[in-house]
Image: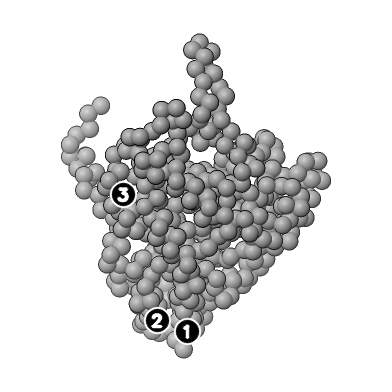
Amino acid sequence: MRIPQERLEKYRNLKREFSEEDHVNLQPIQRGGVLSEEAMRAIIEFGDGYSTCDWCPPKSARLDMIEKPPIKDFYNDLAEFLGMDLARVVTRCREAKFIAFRMLGAPGDYVVVDGLAHYSSYIAAELAGLKVKEVPVGGPPEYKVDLDAYAAKIEEVKGETGRLPAAVLLTHVDYQYGNVNDAEVVGKIARDYGVPFILNCAYSAGVMPVDGKNVQADVITGSGHKSWAASAPTGILALRKSLEEKLLRRASIQGDLTSRSFVSKELALLGCTVMGAPLLTLIASFPAVVERIEKWDEEVQKARFFVGELERIQGVKQVGDRPKRHTLIHFETEPFFRVSQSHKRKGYFLYDELRARKIVGIQPGLTKHFKLNTYGLTWEQVRYAAQAFLEIAEKYGLEVR
Ligand SMILES: *Cc1c(COP(=O)(O)O)cnc(C)c1O
């Protein structure tokens, strides 16, 4: 069918809601995915469809074998950087989890997950035909996952099914409170039971140091667009050599007429995964990522400073780990909610006030509690954003200490 030109007009000149250059963006999922300059250039260079495939080796035709651009070397360096043996780039963190669940489990098996796991962990389990057993989360104000309870949950699965769970998954840093879990505790429990340990590093690897070897992770999953200064969709699947045969099993199917087979293709990766621009942004940002994780302590200092400033507003309270050990911050902000009740814009007043000060990223309409992320902002931007919240509080007569 022919689409009339005037209907196509809106597709021609696409613009983002705001520009990163002249706004302070506090959006929790966006801070770690701001592109490096090298990645910006890679998008232009490799924007064409299968642009990575110029030098695909004819025998082992597979993305991870390509040496020009240096994809093969990158996969090796990526694995080493994470303290793992092998790495693959997939479309998203959730796909990495799905691949791990699907290849480690059989339908009906359990996977043990922390009660703060991301929704995509549950969906990945469901699509892989697995059931979940949740490890409980403690109450306010810290909402800590009871890591020792992984042992009891593994026992529970054993009692119920007569089998061990297919895997245990720990969310290294959760999306709700930005709490950093001690992965070593779960790594040890998993090792004692001989259950594969999947560490979901969507909010950690790429922004802070992660050493899979140290914590005895069997699989690490990561998100390029969340934490590696890369475009979407990019995810990371890193694993121990001992799981290579399971997770990266080759295809064995054969055509019944042609007898064609595809023995070099990795089954769960459907042969090749992310080709073209998104993969190349991840690669181009890698040197910057290797460097930036060394400055994690300072990023945490900025987050703590921000918490200290906002808590000068009477009634505003940071929940989760205290003091902060990550830059994703969850605030309870009852006083702003009280303001919203009598404001003609209701909950949107806070968004409006921030937006007027060129600050974005707090979910529009939210005032009772909200999340934000200070990762990668300059000190000047962090001070400016904190000052803006204090100004808004004073404007509406809230008490500021
Ligand atoms: C954001 C997030 C994900 C999703 O990452 P994708 O790469 O978009 O699949 C998974 N897990 C956690 C803990 C997250 O915070």
Q: Position of residue 63 (x, y in %)?
A: 43, 37
Q: Position of residue 262 (x, y in %)?
A: 50, 24
The residue where tag 2 is placed is 390
Residue occupying the point 73% across, 61% down: 148
The residue where tag 1 is placed is 312
Disc 2, SS: helix
Residue occupying the point 63% across, 53% down: 217
The residue where tag 3 is placed is 42
- Position of 103 relative to 280 (above/below): above
Q: Quadrant of residue 252?
A: top right
* Amino acid at the residue labelled 3: Ala
- Nearer the observer, 258 or 97: 258
How is colour applied across the structure in the image? one colour
Q: Nearer the viewer, mark 2 or mark 3?
A: 3
- Nearer the observer, 245 or 169: 245
Where is the N terminus found, in terms of image quarters?
top left
Q: Are marks 2 and 3 in contact (CB under 8 Å)?
A: no
**Gap in angstroms between the C-alphas marked 3 and 1:** 43 Å
In the image, 288: left or right of 11?
right
Q: Nearer the viewer, mark 3 or mark 1?
A: 3
* Amino acid at the residue labelled 2: Leu
Mark 3 surroundings: few (<14), some (14-19) or many (≥20) residues within 10 A:
many
**Gap in angstroms between the C-alphas marked 2 and 1:** 8 Å
Q: Are marks 2 and 1 in contact (CB under 8 Å)?
A: yes
